[in-house]
Image: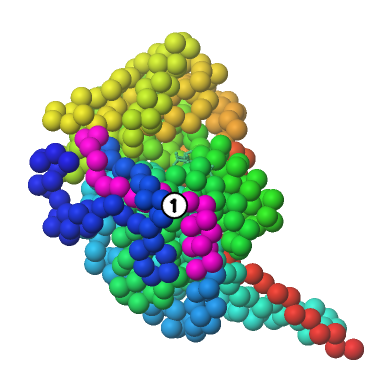
Amino acid sequence: MTVATRTKLLPEVEAFLSQSPFPSFVGGRDFPASSGDTIVTIDPGSGEKIAEIHDLSAVEVDRAVEVAEAAFPAWAALSQVDRSDILKKLADAVEKHKPVIAQIEALDAGKIEAQANGDVQNFVDTLRYFIDLASKVELREKIDSPGYDAWKYRQPWGACAFIFPWNFPFLLIGWGITPALAAGNTVVIKPAEDTSLSAIYLARLAKEVGVPDGVINVVTGSGAGAGAALSNNSQIKRMSFTGSPEVGRMVGEACGRNLVPVKLELGGKGAAVVFDDVDVAETAEKLVGAITFHSGQVCCDATRWFVHSNIYDEFVTECTNRMSKIRVGHPLDPTSDMGPVVNSKQCSRVLGYLDKGQAGGAECLCGGSEAKVEGYTGNYIKPSLLAGSLDNVAAQEEIFGPVAYLAKFDSEEQAIEMANDTDYGLANSVWTKDDERAARVAEAMVAGNSWINAHNVFAQGVPYGGVNKSGLGGGVLSPETLMDYYRSTSVVRPLA
Ligand code: NAD
């Protein structure tokens, strides 16, 4: 790690990183890979090694599931009040350690530190939301059925598995595991190999505040190794996968073979439909903010911007002016607006799309290449705008970088058709002062989420999930999500 980076680290973060290599954490203790194999995790902002994490074998992952199953009966048997008290302590501890977790996350995922702070707070808020919601669930719910005494009895499932991507490691762990824990399940978490550190920190913190051993387990390792082992394990009671459609399909197949219920939260190619009655400068500001947030590595981002032809030129000028002023820099540098992308593979992928898009006829309006950051050789890319035909590869496929693709429209019908011309269905937005039109377009766009005059909006209580190639199985963040983590038994006694 460069001296410049090291001087920015909190003493607690330095102390944590000095413990590398990091074993997994299972059953309340370190759980090393018996092979001794490790995976190096790097700072995407400098390309330098931060730490190593253990690379578990399939047998070791299976062992972690057994441990989670063994811990389940006692955790499930706690009263809701007792379980909530323990989880509240975890929420308080995460909040107390927010600067430390956020810095670990910023360094590991290449995330601007202030944004990482927001992610950690989001974890805390989500945990508190589900603790509160779980306390209101009727475990025995009467069913009105003439001639029968009937009720639904809800109880947790057992050991639930979670596989997460690298873009929002800590926040997504919160969205995933907190409803499961609040309902009384135990969890096995497989974080992405690039960003496992905050998950390990969390599991250790959970132990410190009294979460019983085996309730929160973290298995680290490669996708093809530890990830595939977890998705193929027939003892898990549920699987929740967040990541690419390609891997999601494999995880879904494995769970299908074992008849394990699976939830898939996958990629996207969202649209922003901008009508000609908007405040152009303000809309440009918000959309540039959205596409540069975490370097565009946001599944629900608006990556196709459809703009009414009456304001198209003005909109492009506003956007290019703003994009050229974005300060690209190291995530721990407080003057940076946008950091790197997560690794060199992702950097090549994004640059490859910029090249292929232009080779296919797209015009580059802004950016279009690597960004140079003085003192660092990280994976930096300039915020970029392409424009042109919608059959271009850059308009069709998920790029997962700070790149938006622009096109004009002339009518509401045409805009809806353009927005829906994709296999994905995660999130879109519509921008207009006309509330009726906003509602009409929001409802006509085929996706799990439609936002009005905003993009990337997440509120606890509002379901968030995808349709088509963007996901299946119910989504996250809502009361329905909590109910997914109870299995229900219908109990019926004929009265006659
Ligand atoms: P990825 O699919 O490559 O990896 C996700 C996770 O799956 C990682 O932990 C990885 O180790 C694991 N994995 C890889 N191969 C596996 C296998 N064969 N079996 C089981 N697990 C395996 O995705 P990524 O590159 O880490 O993340 C980017 C993708 O995630 C994008 O498509 C993005 O849109 C999507 N994403 C979706 C959401 C959402 O909520 N819908 C949120 C964040 C990211």
Mark 1, Cα crowd under 10 Å, few <14 / some 14-19 / many 20+, is many
Horizontal and vertical percent for residue 315? Answer: 35, 25
Q: Secondary structure at mark 1?
A: loop
In the image, taking residue 372 as reference, residue 385 lies left or right, namely right
Q: How many marks?
A: 1
Which one is nearer the viewer's eye here, 449 or 397? 397
Quadrant of the frame with the N terminus: top left
Horizontal and vertical percent for residue 204? Answer: 32, 66
Whether residue 44 is visible here, answered yes or no, is yes
Which three-letter amino acid code belongs to the residue tagged 1?
A: Leu
View extreme (right): residue: 496
View extreme (bottom): residue: 496
* Residue 240 drawn above or below residue 28: above
Residue 250 lies in quadrant: top right
Ligand 1 closer than 8 Å to label 1 CB: no
Q: Which residues are magenta?
A: 45-67
Horizontal and vertical percent for residue 223? Answer: 48, 44
Q: Which residue is mark 1?
A: 56
* Residue 422 drawn above or below residue 196: above
> Can residue 62 be found in the magenta stretch?
yes
The residue sitting at 53% across, 82% down in the picture is: 77
Horizontal and vertical percent for residue 375? Answer: 13, 30
Residue 474 lies in quadrant: bottom right
The residue sitting at 33% across, 37% down in the picture is: 342
> Can residue 460 be found in the magenta stretch?
no
The residue sitting at 41% across, 51% down in the picture is: 35
Quadrant of the frame with the C terminus: bottom right
Residue 171 lies in quadrant: bottom left
* Residue 482 drawn above or below residue 364: below
In the image, taking residue 26 as reference, residue 449 lies left or right, namely right
The residue sitting at 48% across, 12% down in the picture is: 360
